[in-house]
Amino acid sequence: MKKLMLAGLLAVLGFAPAIALAQAQADEKMVVGQVQSVDETGTKITLTDGTKLLTPLGSVVRPGVLQEGTMVVAGYREENGDKVLTKLLKRPEPAPPAPGESPKR
């Protein structure tokens, strides 16, 4: 009986990290938008819709990486009313048409 209880306890503890990860991902939200500005410290990104995203403590956006108009996909968690980044991806720019090609319709 004790072996069965121990096995059950180990099974539950084995799933604890997966449950914690699922909870953390459930708290994460996503936003897609266009960069309006990055503050001079590199810690705050403002999107054209007014969304303000903060970098995690100790992290900054390198100068020149995000320019005005860049499309981004951002994951964030709300902490004390702030949107703190958990992920930040630049959306790829569409390739310009090859010389002599007309745009497809």
Image (spheres, grey):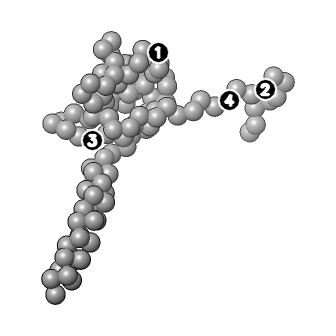
Separation of residues labelled 4 and 2 (CA atoms): 9 Å
Give the residue type that dot 3 points to: Arg
Give the residue type that dot 1 points to: Gly
Q: Quadrant of the C terminus?
A: top right
Give the residue type that dot 2 points to: Ala
Outermost residue, bottom side: 1
Q: Which residue is mark 4?
A: 95
Outermost residue, front side: 3
Q: Earlier in the sequence, mark 1 or mark 4?
A: 1
Q: Earlier in the sequence, mark 4 or mark 3?
A: 3
Give the residue type that dot 4 points to: Ala
Q: Which residue is mark 3?
A: 77
Disc 3, SS: strand
Q: Is residue 39 left or right of residue 91?
A: left
Q: Is residue 46 left or right of residue 101?
A: left
Image coordinates of residue 74 in percent, x first then y, are: 39, 37
Disc 2, SS: loop
Q: Which residue is mark 1?
A: 64
Front disc: 1 or 2: 1
Front disc: 4 or 3: 3
Question: In terms of depth relative to the viewer, which is nearer, 73 or 23?
Answer: 23
The quadrant holding residue 73 is top left
Q: Is residue 5 left or right of residue 63?
A: left
Q: Which residue is mark 2?
A: 98
